[in-house]
């Protein structure tokens, strides 16, 4: 790739740290935006953000509070505002730039699609879901595409669960090593009035651990971003997930094989719910069926470097990795 100047906003997160290091290794000049003291530009510094995006080749917007938490009122507000406020700030900075960037890729999520067990969801015919997580994704993308930016191509990267050194796979690796690496079994669970009103209740649908698990390796997050930069015909929503999809049951079995775990006890929902409450997370992250296909990336010629789950998991848990 041709070296240039790139702004990575939200550089301190799991994906951001990896991308900053990879881009710098490739000779890119990377300007980071974040809340920490080590960021080149801090959120809230409008003048600094305008100067940062002026004349760059690419802006990557990755900011947003982690969804690995309980969906309390306060956390829901922070999840939404952390995405909308940072995306709005980037849009305002780009609009004010004398030389606006030709490409702005902003994070989105494959969770925007409905719970899907019947067919894959593509950009062309995927059906958007409902509930809190979907509402956040919709608002996030609307904020990305809202401002008039005629000189900047915009992409909403609808990313599946990302596999790499860190992230969502780490707790599953730990549980598998403890013998708890069986399928996550959905089932009936009472709904409270508050969770129904907030859109945070997960309705029982998938049986026997057959909820789909769409994923993508960090290497292909980088690869897809570079591919998008080289293909100016691609804009709008882009699904970022490996072309093959697994079920939760298949994911559990593959993790056991890779880790050499002799068995894995399945976890029914009546155990998952109190466990999720104890560790302050939500069962939706495990029980929603995400079946997403990267139709536009494949049609444009992108070749995934890690298309198979087994190979991706082996790389994640390799002795040289951080999840050993």
Image (cartoon, rainbow, N blue to C red):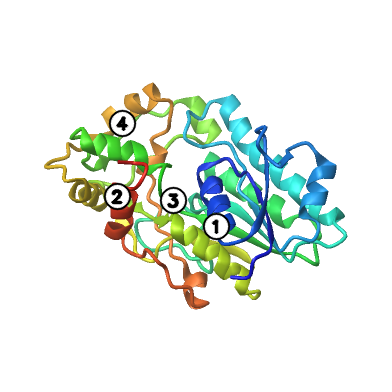
Residue located at (42% from left, 68% from top): 304
Q: Nearer the viewer, mark 2 or mark 1?
A: 1
Q: Nearer the viewer, mark 2 or mark 4?
A: 2
Q: Nearer the viewer, residue 300 or 121?
A: 300
Q: Earlier in the sequence, mark 4 or mark 1?
A: 1
CA neighbours of label 4 inside 10 A, class few (<14), some (14 to 19), many (20+): some
Cα–Cα span, label 2 and label 4: 28 Å
Q: Quadrant of residue 308?
A: bottom left
The residue pinned by badge 2 equals: 318
Q: For the C terminus, which image quadrant?
A: top left
* Label ID, residue 272: 4
Cα–Cα span, label 3 and label 1: 21 Å
Cα–Cα span, label 4 and label 3: 22 Å
- Residue 144 at what x, y percent from top left? 70, 53
State yes or no: discs 3 and 2 in contact (Cβ < 8 Å): no
Q: Earlier in the sequence, mark 2 or mark 4?
A: 4
CA neighbours of label 1 inside 10 A, class few (<14), some (14 to 19), many (20+): few
State yes or no: discs 4 and 1 in contact (Cβ < 8 Å): no
């Amino acid at each position: 790739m041709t070296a240039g100047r790139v702004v990575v906003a939200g550089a301190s997160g799991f994906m951001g740290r990896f991308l900053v290091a990879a881009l710098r290794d490739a000779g890119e000049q990377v300007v980071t935006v974040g809340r920490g003291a080590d960021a080149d530009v801090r959120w809230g510094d409008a003048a600094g953000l305008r100067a940062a995006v002026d004349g760059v080749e690419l802006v990557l917007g990755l900011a947003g509070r982690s969804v690995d938490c309980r969906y309390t009122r306060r956390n829901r507000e922070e999840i939404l505002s952390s995405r909308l406020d940072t995306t709005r700030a980037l849009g305002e900075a780009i609009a004010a730039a004398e030389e606006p960037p030709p490409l702005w890729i902003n994070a989105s999520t494959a969770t925007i699609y409905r719970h899907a067990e019947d067919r894959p969801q593509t950009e062309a015919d995927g059906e958007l879901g409902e509930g809190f997580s979907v509402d956040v994704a919709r608002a996030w993308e609307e904020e990305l595409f809202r401002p008039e930016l005629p000189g900047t191509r915009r992409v909403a990267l609808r990313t599946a669960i990302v596999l790499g050194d860190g992230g969502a796979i780490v707790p599953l690796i730990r549980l598998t090593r403890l013998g708890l690496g069986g399928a996550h079994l959905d089932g009936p669970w009472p709904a409270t009035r508050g969770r129904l009103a907030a859109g945070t209740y997960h309705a029982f649908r998938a049986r026997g651990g057959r909820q789909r698990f769409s994923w993508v390796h960090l290497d292909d997050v980088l690869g897809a971003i570079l591919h998008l930069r080289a293909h100016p015909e691609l804009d709008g929503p882009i699904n970022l997930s490996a072309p093959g999809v697994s079920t939760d049951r298949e994911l559990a079995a593959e993790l056991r094989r890779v880790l050499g775990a002799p068995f894995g006890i399945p976890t029914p929902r009546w155990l998952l719910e109190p466990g999720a409450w104890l560790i302050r997370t939500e069962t939706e992250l495990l029980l929603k069926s995400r079946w997403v296909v990267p139709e536009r990336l494949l049609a444009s010629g992108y070749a995934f470097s890690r298309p198979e789950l087994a190979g991706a998991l082996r790389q994640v848990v390799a002795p040289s990795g951080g999840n050993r």
